[in-house]
Amino acid sequence: QVQLVESGGGSVQAGGSLRLSCAVSGSIFSINAMGWYRQAPGKQRELVAAITSGGTTNYPDSVKGRFTISRDNAKNTVYLQMNSLKPEDTAVYYCNTVIGTVNRREYEYWGQGTQVTVSS
């Protein structure tokens, strides 16, 4: 079993900052890609940031320059630093990870989600 525990969501005014954390635990052989997605009411879930095991990052244009993803491999934790937040960043944010097994299979896991609310 693999568990993802998220923390750090909350409410902030426009222009403010929040930092999300996601700790991965359980039966882990390797953690490959890690990422953050978000889903606003009435919208599809979308990628916010991703980071490979080698540290390569990827962001959509909507958050580029404002959000930074990082990972601590020793702690099996991924972070999302969100600066210059806008009301349109309001959503439930989900941690995502791809776990590798000893027999070279990969499985995808999701966190429970954490609410981020940005007021104008």
Image (cartoon, grey):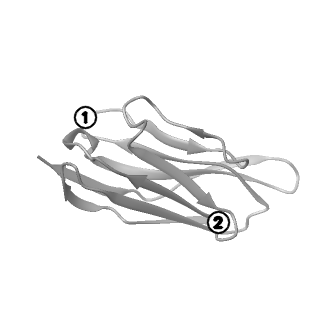
Residue 10 horizontal side relative to residue 44, left or right? left
Residue at x 73%, y 47% (from the top left corner): 54
- Up/down of 6 relative to 61, above or below: below
Nearer the N terminus, badge 2 or badge 1? 1
Count of labels in the image: 2
Report x, y in % for residue 44: 36, 33
- Up/down of 114 relative to 64, above or below: below
Residue 80 horizontal side relative to residue 118, left or right? right
Residue 55 horizontal side relative to residue 18, left or right? right
At mark 1, the secondary structure is loop
Residue at x 37%, y 51% (from the top left corner): 82
Query: Disc 2 or disc 1, which is closer to the eye?
Result: 2
Report x, y in % for residue 41: 24, 40
Q: Which residue is mark 2?
A: 76
**Residue 62: numbered disc:** none
Residue at x 33%, y 62% (from the top left corner): 9
At mark 2, the secondary structure is loop
Residue 83 horizontal side relative to residue 72, left or right? left
Q: Which residue is mark 1?
A: 42
Report x, y in % for residue 81: 42, 55
Q: Amino acid at mark 1?
A: Gly
Q: Quadrant of the N terminus?
A: bottom right
